[in-house]
Image: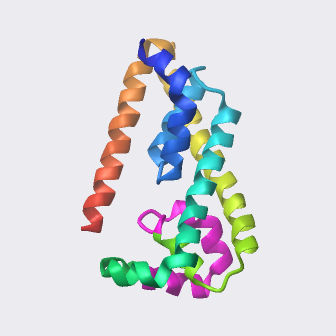
Amino acid sequence: MNLSELIETYGYWVVLGGTLLEGESVLLLAGFAAYSGLLELHAVIAVATLGSFLGDQLWFLLGRMHGARLLARFPKYAARAARAEELLTKYDTPIILAVRFLYGLRMILPFTIGMSRIPTLRFQLLNFAGAVLWASSGAAAGYLFGNAIEAILGDIHRYEKYGLAFLIVAGLAWWWYGRRRKT
């Protein structure tokens, strides 16, 4: 089975799993794969929206049900939670909408929101709207990257593997940089 067949067979599952977590690089790759004809752009957006929505709902529910106990058990996250609470107090609606775009706070914010007094339904509605915005913009960025590469290089299918390799390396570098900044 070659790379194209793997993407066509398992691509949507990878998008779902990747977007349940932080998933920016997975989403960009999926947008590029959609440009290449391996995935359908609307389906990528729908699956990424679902994964992102469900991932943040999980963190929200963990915060709502076990927030204080988990922070007591893992005190190294208390400073991030305090910063998230500070932002949330000032800008609750924009923060909920933009949570996916705030690298480094992506998981702690929904958790902290769950610990707050924000009603669950309000969070769900804003979380869904934010997931749609994030999935649409991320998939579109990957798709436009494919379009730009083709405009520069011509026949993109000759360079498809290089473009995917570049995006994978860039995504891993971004992940590594983020992990390194946290320590």
Question: Which quadrant of the view contains residue 179?
Answer: bottom left
**Dominant secondary-structure state across the stretch colored magenta:** helix
Residue 79 visible here: no
Q: Is residue 149 above or below residue 125?
A: above
What residue do we see at 34% from left, 51% from top?
175
Is residue 96 shown in magenta? yes
Residue 34 visible here: yes
Is residue 98 shown in magenta? yes
Q: Is residue 121 above or below residue 151?
A: below
Question: In front here: 162 or 113?
Answer: 113
For the C terminus, give its image quadrant: bottom left
x and y percent of residue 22 in the render?
47, 54
x and y percent of residue 42 in the render?
70, 35
Q: Is residue 60 above or below residue 176?
A: below
Question: Which segment did they paint magenta?
Answer: 81-107
For the N terminus, give its image quadrant: top left
What residue do we see at 53% from left, 61% from top?
101
x and y percent of residue 38 in the render?
57, 21
Query: In the rendered view, does 104 fall on the left or right side of 179?
Result: right
x and y percent of residue 142 in the render?
54, 37
What residue do we see at 66% from left, 32% from top?
41
Question: In front here: 105 or 163?
Answer: 105
Query: In the rendered view, does 106 fall on the left or right side of 169?
Result: right
